[in-house]
Image (spheres, rainbow, N blue to C red):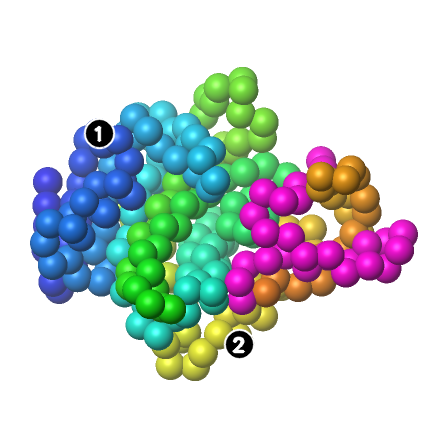
């Protein structure tokens, strides 16, 4: 089913391979306005960052992809889109519970459990982003998860009540475009600061692991490129990591 809302297209699907793939094909086939979204009850091939799969039971969660044309955003500084999306999901979930944090780069955690994740895919033209598709999965009402998933949790498990998906979508879109307009008018500064304040395991030393082994470090910064900057405890050394080059140790 398709609805038009202020020129933004909203597509509801019972089943699709991936909302990101569907929206990408839509952009190829027709002129699609910024802010258009695809929402599905179920994905047969849901994906997360770096090829990870995303599991979500049919009809119990939020599976959404959002289209942006972020004018003037350089390809090597596109992590601002990830910051905005992460903060929007966090701010939306903050309306229902405490202890929501952003686990670098853009997983959303409640305490030490994962409640949401995202996959952001951008097409580049020259040195700037042509368009971005932001795929978001939020564990909304699911109560049983496959044992293979290490630490999932849903909003229903946290709050004890079922949540209306359409209201969650409305809240997310409101939070997202508040931040997006702030970025367009005021730049990245406030959003970068807010992202750092809301990071999971920030402001203390924790165990991490890279290709050389385990070490204790503190999060020092997240660069505009998205690289994570750590300060090691033992040697007071600064280390920079791209996605998947370092892992949090539970």
For residue 19: magenta?
no
Q: Residues within 10 Å of mark 1 (few under 14, many from 20)?
A: some
Which residue is outermost to the right? 234
Does residue 14 appear to the left or right of 172 in the view shown? left
| Disc 1, SS | loop
Q: Quadrant of the C terminus?
A: top right
Q: Nearer the viewer, residue 193 or 128?
A: 128
Does residue 214 appear to the left or right of 182 in the view shown? right
| Residue 154 higher or lower than 170, as above or below | above
| Residue numbers of the magenta segment | 224-250
For residue 235: magenta?
yes
Locate residue 172: give its quadrant.
bottom left
Does residue 190 appear to the left or right of 13 in the view shown? right
- Name which residue lies at 58% across and 43% down: 244
User: Which residue matches tag 2?
Assistant: 189
> Which numbered disc covers residue 62?
none
Which residue is outermost to the top? 147
- Name which residue lies at 50% across and 70% down: 191
- Name which residue lies at 30% across and 26% down: 44
User: Which residue matches tag 1?
Assistant: 15
Q: Nearer the viewer, residue 90 or 48?
A: 48
């Amino acid at each position: 089913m398709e609805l038009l809302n202020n020129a933004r297209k909203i597509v509801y699907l019972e089943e699709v391979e991936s909302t990101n793939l569907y929206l990408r094909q839509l952009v190829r086939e027709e002129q699609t306005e910024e802010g258009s979204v695809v929402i599905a009850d179920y994905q047969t091939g849901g994906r997360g960052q770096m090829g990870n799969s995303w599991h979500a039971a049919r009809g119990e969660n939020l599976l959404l992809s959002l289209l942006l044309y972020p004018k003037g955003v350089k390809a090597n500084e596109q992590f601002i889109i990830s910051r905005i999306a992460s903060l929007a999901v966090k701010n939306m979930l903050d309306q229902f519970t405490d202890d929501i944090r952003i686990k670098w780069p853009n997983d959303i955690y409640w305490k030490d459990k994962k409640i949401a994740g995202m996959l952001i895919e951008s097409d580049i033209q020259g040195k700037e982003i042509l368009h971005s598709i932001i795929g978001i999965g939020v564990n909304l009402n699911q109560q049983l998860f496959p044992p293979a998933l290490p630490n999932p949790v849903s909003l229903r498990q946290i709050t004890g009540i079922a949540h209306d998906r359409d209201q969650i979508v409305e809240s997310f879109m409101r939070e997202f475009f508040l931040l997006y307009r702030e970025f367009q008018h005021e730049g990245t500064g406030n959003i970068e600061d807010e992202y750092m304040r809301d990071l999971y395991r920030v402001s203390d030393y924790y165990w991490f692991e890279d290709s050389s082994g385990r070490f204790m470090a503190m999060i020092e910064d997240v660069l505009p490129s998205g690289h994570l900057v750590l300060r090691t405890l033992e040697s007071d050394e600064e280390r920079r990591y791209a996605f998947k080059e370092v892992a949090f140790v539970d």
